[in-house]
Amino acid sequence: MTTRKIATGAKWRQNLVLAAILTLLGVGAGFLLSGGNDIEARSAFGLKPTGFPQLVSIEPLPAMDGEMCQWMPASASGSLRAALLQTGFQTGTPGRAASAADPSREEVRRRPPLRTIKDPYSSFSAIAVDPVRDEVVMTDESLFQILVYDRLTNTPPTAQFSEPKRSIGGLDTKVDYVCGLYIDPASGDIYAINNDTVDTLVIFNRQAKGNIPPTRELYTPHGTYGIVVDEGAEELFLTIEHDSAVVVFNKWAEKDAEPLRLLQGDRTRLADPHGIALDAERGVMYVANFGSSQLHDPNLDNKSRPMYSRGEGKANWPLTRNSVIPGSGRFTDPSITVYAKDARGNTAPLRVIQGPKARLNWPTGLAIDPVTHDLFVTNDMNDEVLVFDGDADGDVAPKRILSGPKTMIKNPTGVWVDPENEELWVASFGNYTATVFPLDASGDTAPLRVIRSGPLGKSALMIGNPHPVAYDSKREQILVPN
């Protein structure tokens, strides 16, 4: 008995010492990760309950087996040093670029590229129909344009592409990474959203063409994607990807106008929202979510930083990435969240379509049939259009699916319901096509008409808003994240 008590006590003391050491190491790691910043340190190891998983520790990944990119150390050859010298880095001051006055730097700037990877054809993303004037409008994320076609255009299989009636593009237009689109039914004015770049909603007269300034501009939060307008209330709804929000402006707002209201917060279940649609008759709003989100602390927000300065001092401006609580990021299944159209603040959705039966995989574009109240969803990664009952809720299967080789649908991002002509329009980012179907089309159904901006059967490069590239030396491949 005595021997067992001694052994047990010794083990208890060992565990106590081990726990103390681990605690000190955890605190030290938290301090290092936070860089000594009080707010970040408090978030790292003085966690507040959030109801969601939070980062509490980091451990290195185990060694990986299988094929991997081969890294060449700088000491292996002089090629890295030569490359750095060629691109204007000084050897005397490690990590510092040569000054702007350095002639070698200017020479590098003027040097033409050896080759360029760029899609020469337009890649359709958003789409909208003007039935009054029998026109269809598409945004082009490849060549940064807005393209206007006759609604009845049908590209013959033997033709390489169909030319638009008009196009809007060039530096003066402020049309850049243009993804969202709306057409004023009365005037035919074109509203176009620039997503990650210009942070400006541009509005053009319906007759606009060429490199001309927009008729009107509205400064938008960074990462704006989807757009829809409630004509009765004269309100303009925008989805904000990175900060998981919906902002509502007056339809006629311009320049530095502030939003009328804001929908944002953990209870909203907004998670990287993209497409948006309104059922005005039923007074509900639908939002398509990719599934990534994070928690915000308003005490951390600093809208005066350059990227977000347009929101400084404005009411109803979304909390930005400056206010994100470290470790609060999370991934959930893609979803369609449904709200009352006048929802604001941190309001929970009325319904949520989400789960394996729903098949959602990057749901990007949304459209409502005002007659049947059916909800149309472009399912980007599955090359399909899903159709749900407007009252759908939970893990429910779509009532019908439009997909298959005959449909020519490939990475669809834009969708539009034309109730006047009883047609469904789909813009495919993956193969230069805008396809037209009957509203009740399902299965592997061939389109009624096709507008192509590139060769038949050719896959688009799908380079839109590319970020830093990487090179896999083992496979000799260039990796381009978008």
Image (cartoon, helix red, strand yellow):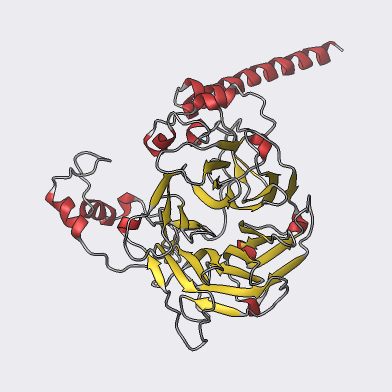
Q: Does residue 330 appear to the left or right of 281 in the view shown?
A: left
Considering every residue shown, the one lying at the far bottom of the view is 158
Q: Quadrant of residue 478?
A: bottom left
Considering every residue shown, the one lying at the far right of the view is 1
Q: Is residue 245 above or below residue 108?
A: above
- Residue 119 in view (yes/no): no
Please provide percent x and percent y for residue 203: 43, 54
Q: Quadrant of residue 292?
A: top right
Q: Does residue 140 appear to the left or right of 441 in the view shown?
A: left
- Residue 57 in view (yes/no): yes
Task: Tell which of 161 and 313 is nearer to you.
Answer: 313
Residue sitting at x 46%, y 58%: 189
Q: Does residue 186 appear to the left or right of 96 in the view shown?
A: right
Residue sitting at x 19%, y 44%: 98
Considering every residue shown, the one lying at the far front of the view is 186
Task: Tell which of 249 and 4 is nearer to you.
Answer: 249
Q: Is residue 94 above or below residue 216?
A: above
Residue sitting at x 33%, y 67%: 116
Please provide percent x and percent y for residue 44: 56, 26
Please identify the quadrant where the N terminus is shown: top right
Q: Is residue 430 above or below residue 2?
A: below
Please provide percent x and percent y for residue 311: 44, 34
Please provide percent x and percent y for residue 416: 60, 64
Task: Tell which of 448 and 336 is nearer to you.
Answer: 448
Q: Is residue 43 above or below residue 115?
A: above
Q: Does residue 267 appear to the left or right of 142 in the view shown?
A: right
- Give the mark count: 0
